[in-house]
Image (cartoon, rainbow, N blue to C red):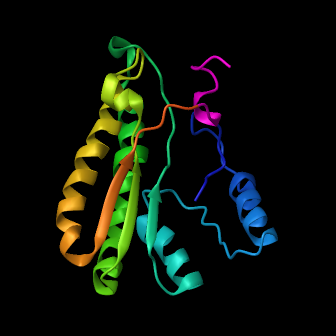
């Protein structure tokens, strides 16, 4: 799932997702793309179920930035970050959860951030969402254990499309 917008979440296109699908298929794998928002978790998971018949792994990696110093964050900038990062992770994971329980198997990877752990100037909204994801993942790891559902969090600190204006080369 990649809406193909820029790192701020502006615009929409399928090019980024289509490139990944094409590369996987070229190398002999099977892949499909879904162009819905992560807030439409049921649709995202349905795409996987329709293509593969089951869902074994969820990687919650959707993200955008709305960097502003704390006193300048608008309600809109706060809310969109929470919707994409936190609500998106919640919606997709919840949509997959019961399928994983029935299978007695599932792997969930949540993407947090070093900003969520240590903070970063101009990223109070982003840092808050990313730390909450860690708490969600820890709880899911406990709840999923009895059904062989593992949930882990990664907190990378690396350059990407999303960080190109805030991290020097």
Q: Farthest right residue?
A: 26
Report the front residue among 83 and 101.
101
Quarter of the image for residue 124 reads top left
Residue shown at the point (65%, 38%) measured from the top left:
6
Residue shown at the point (61%, 61%) measured from the top left:
35
Residue 71 sits inside the magenta stretch: no
Location of residue 38 with respect to 30 vertically, above or below = above
Quarter of the image for residue 31 reads bottom right
Residue shown at the point (47%, 72%) measured from the top left:
45
Report the front residue among 78 and 123.
123
Q: Is residue 93 left or right of residue 169?
A: left
Residue shown at the point (35%, 81%) measured from the top left:
99
Residue 163 sits inside the magenta stretch: yes
Q: Is residue 8 left or right of residue 112?
A: right
Q: Which residues are magenta?
A: 159-169
Q: Main secondary structure of the magenta part?
A: loop
- Whether residue 98 is visible to the viewer of this picture, yes or no, is yes
- Whether residue 7 is visible to the viewer of this picture, yes or no, is no
Quarter of the image for residue 1 reads bottom right
Location of residue 78 with respect to 70 vertically, above or below = below
Location of residue 39 with respect to 103 vertically, above or below = above
- Where residue 135 sits in the image (x, y, percent)? 23, 46
- Where residue 13 sits in the image (x, y, percent)? 70, 52
Location of the C terminus (image quadrant) = top right
């Amino acid at each position: 799932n990649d809406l193909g917008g820029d790192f701020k979440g502006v615009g929409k296109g399928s090019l980024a997702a289509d490139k990944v699908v094409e590369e996987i298929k070229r190398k002999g794998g099977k892949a499909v793309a879904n162009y819905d928002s992560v807030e439409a978790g049921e649709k995202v998971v349905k795409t996987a179920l329709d293509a593969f018949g089951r869902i074994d792994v969820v990687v919650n990696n959707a993200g955008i930035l709305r960097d502003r110093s704390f006193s300048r964050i608008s309600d809109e900038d706060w809310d969109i970050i929470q919707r994409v990062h936190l609500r998106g992770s919640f919606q997709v994971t919840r949509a997959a959860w019961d399928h994983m329980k029935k299978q007695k198997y599932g792997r969930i990877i949540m993407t947090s951030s070093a900003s969520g752990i240590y903070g970063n100037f101009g990223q109070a909204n982003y840092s808050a969402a990313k730390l909450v994801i860690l708490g969600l993942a820890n709880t899911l790891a406990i709840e999923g254990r009895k059904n062989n559902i593992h949930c882990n969090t990664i907190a990378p600190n690396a350059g990407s499309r999303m960080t190109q204006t805030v991290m020097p080369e």
